[in-house]
Image: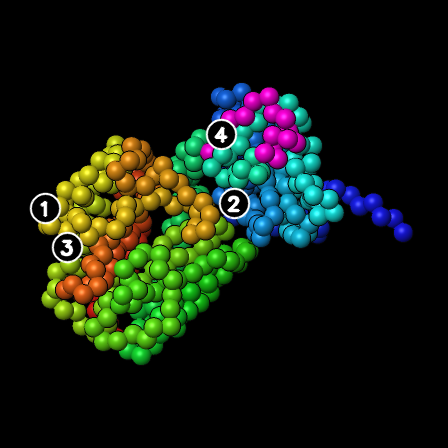
Amino acid sequence: MATDRPEQDRFHNGGRKDALPFAEGEYHDRLAGLRDIMEMHGLDAVVLTSMHNVAYYSGFLYCSFGRPYAAVVTATDCITVSAGIDAGQPWRRSIGDTITYTDWKRDNFWRVVAGITGTGKAIGCEADHLTMERAEKLNAFLSPRRGVDISAATMQQRMLKSPAEIALIRQGAAVADLGGHAIRDAIRAGVTELEVAMAGRDAMEREIASRFPDAEYRDTWVWFQSGLNTDGAHNPVTSRKLNRGDILSLNCFPMISGYYTALERTLFLSEVDDASLHIWQANIAAHEFGMSLLKPGASCAGVTAQINGFLAERQMLHYRSFGYGHSFGILSHYYGREAGLELREDIDTVLEPGMVISMEPMLTIPDGQPGAGGYREHDILVITEDGAEDITRYPYGPAFNVVG
């Protein structure tokens, strides 16, 4: 019996490609933009290793589970490098070719990558994604004569959305709105955070399947928080039961082919006390003021400074929890982030038409103080030629969100 096994294979199982989230021309345009980056830096090849960049340029959203993946882009090719555990799915779900590496010998992944790029070349990589170990492997197997970090340049490209991306993000925003209404309908005294979250998640997943029958479905989630658990924006769901008068935080995150959208709202169960209502209305005022500032030519830092001033005038700035907004696209809570498009003091990016950004001020009042809890509203806005379009439709404020 033969004991030698191949280091790699081209497993084009099924003989045909599946439908990708976008038309082929969209991916060719993205790759053309990446090749402009390569030409600018004099690169022979780029080795993309992050989930967001591999998906953005190839269409394939990988599941790592401790294994390395890549999309290797040269002047002529975009080849995904995937693990044998995924069989033919990476080829079916990508725009170009796929080479599968086997587990029979350690570092077969890097042998495949080196076989595509060659050795002694000028190589672009994502320094913010490579671990120290994988950076050492890249240098050992590819022996690049020069390396360039292209993570910032690819982020800049992803920050400007195409019409097709904006159309998909609009669909995601509508799905999030639907999830919000399903959550609102499930809220009542005695139910748990988990039960409410499940109602929102199930409604969104069904809606995504209805709107995108050829997609793959994963990663849609809900954070529904109550009482003390509202103090952080990313607090996980618990089995706490809801009580009359509780502050509630609704957070819907539909994921469509790796594309993230969100809806976040403050609610109260049955009644809201005066102290809480005062803080809630102040945060809503900051939310509306912030949305009015989002327009072409405004800088992220400048918008942040103005909202800071708005809250400082109301003696509430010290309750602010984090930045006031962020971008959308191929990102999620465990991969991907366009840090260059966040509403923070240290981000000087100037808003341009085609960018998509949230406005989401949050105030957290410590436990034991009047109005204790976390207050947050979140809308998605598309920057246009002369302003911004709010594509979130679920209402905010006490008129609609004192429920149950």
> Distance from label 1 to label 4 (Cα)?
42 Å
Q: Secondary structure at mark 2?
A: helix
Q: Is residue 23 above or below residue 123?
A: below
> Distance from label 1 to label 2 (Cα)?
42 Å
Q: Is residue 195 above or below residue 389?
A: below
Q: Secondary structure at mark 1?
A: helix
Q: Secondary structure at mark 3?
A: helix
What's under tag 4, amino acid-wise?
Asp
**Nearer to the camera, 37 or 336:** 336
> Distance from label 3 to label 1 (Cα)?
11 Å
Query: Which residue in the protein does label 1 denote?
Result: 313
- Image quadrant assignment for residue 80: top right
Q: Residues within 10 Å of mark 3 (few under 14, many from 20)?
A: some
Residue 259 appearing in the image:
no
Query: Which residue in the protein does label 3 denote?
Result: 282
Residue 68 shown in magenta: no
Q: Do callouts 3 and 2 mark residues in contact (Cβ within 8 Å)?
A: no
Q: Do callouts 2 and 4 mark residues in contact (Cβ within 8 Å)?
A: no
Q: Secondary structure at mark 4?
A: strand
Q: Residues within 10 Å of mark 2 (few under 14, many from 20)?
A: many
Query: Which residue in the protein does label 2 denote?
Result: 51
How is the model colour-coded? rainbow
What's under tag 2, amino acid-wise?
Met
Along the polypeptide, which appears first: circle 2 or circle 4? 2
What's under tag 1, amino acid-wise?
Glu
Q: Residues within 10 Å of mark 1 (few under 14, many from 20)?
A: few
Q: Do callouts 3 and 4 mark residues in contact (Cβ within 8 Å)?
A: no
Which residue in the rendered view is the most extreme toward the right? 1
Along the polypeptide, which appears first: circle 3 or circle 2? 2
Along the polypeptide, which appears first: circle 1 or circle 4? 4
Stretch of the chain drawn in magenta = 136-151
Q: Is residue 350 above or below residue 365?
A: above
